Image (tube, rainbow, N blue to C red):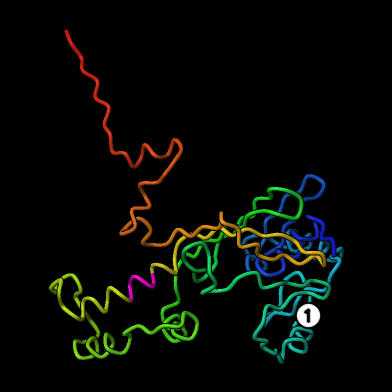
Amino acid sequence: MEIKRRDLLKFLGVSTGTILLSQGTKVLSSPFMVAAQGKETVKTMVKASQYWTFSPVKIPIPLTIENLSDEQQKSKYKTYEVVDDVVLPEGFTYDVIAQWGDKVGDSRFGYNNDYLSFVETRPNEGFLTINFEYISGKTWRETYEKVIGKSLPFEEVKAFADENKGEINTFALAKDDVLKSKIEAIATEALIDQGIGIISLKKNAIGQWQRTYSETDRRITGISGLKDGRYLKATGPGIKVFEKKINRVMKTG
């Protein structure tokens, strides 16, 4: 299925707002900002929505661009089914390319993919960069062993914290303290699941994007360079930042 840029912008606008670029009018609008935008902006949004080439996914609350009366809103939104999946409009599909724990370079695919960028190196092929910005503590803790395949001392650390009003001063613990080593083990794994990942992709014969597991795949984790010395292998102009050299100019006279 071919998706035009214009249709993609419309699609993205369904969940967070509406982007309109027409006849000298530029509107970046969210359906929850009606009071600040005024009635004319709302009318423009409603008019533009008539030209959508797809049916928007139903969300839990009504949007201004639907232009529904109070009674219509009550009728349409009196029930809502929560689906545990990525829900897309009819005609759109998605493919799972990678997931938490998958091998990436000498590490693994991290947690919570926020920022994405794709750099095409040739038709239907390129590199995807992913920002693993943070972990969701409770979910990460509950699913870590199942996904990663090894255990961490969550319960031991939690039990100690519970005995001390939920607080542990890790920095005050001795270096050889067993509790400190357990906390460091948890923190290390959490930092591994944060950072940046770069994976190579290629579209297959049926139009699906798949990983190629190239030797160029990379992971920069929250502890890269801390113990492995990887920071010493930086290249390019930016390496000056890490050389810590100071140029001094002597003035005479």
Image quarter (top left, top right, bottom left or bottom right) of the N terminus: bottom right
**Left or right: where 18 falls relative to 225:** right
Residue 7: x and y in percent read: 80, 60
What residue appears at the point 18 percent right and 70 percent down from the top-left corner?
171
**Left or right: where 193 falls relative to 44:** left
**Left or right: where 171 falls relative to 146:** left
The kind of secondary structure element at disc 1 is loop
Residue 56: x and y in percent read: 78, 73
Question: Which amino acid, mark 1?
Answer: Ser
Residue designated by label 1: 69
Residue at the top extreme, as displayed = 253
What residue appears at the point 27 percent right and 27 percent down from the top-left corner?
247
What residue appears at the point 51 percent right and 74 percent down from the top-left corner?
101
What residue appears at the point 77 percent right and 64 percent down from the top-left corner?
204
Magenta span: predominant SS is helix
As drawn, 184 above or below 82: above
Query: Which of the two residues, 76 or 68, is positioned nearer the viewer here?
Result: 76
Residue 210: x and y in percent read: 69, 66
Query: Which of the two residues, 83 or 229, is positioned nearer the viewer here?
Result: 229
Q: Within the magenta stretch, is there residue 79?
A: no
Q: Which residues are magenta?
A: 186-190
As drawn, 85 above or below 220: below
Q: Quadrant of residue 79?
A: bottom right
Image quarter (top left, top right, bottom left or bottom right) of the C terminus: top left
How many callouts does the rendering have?
1
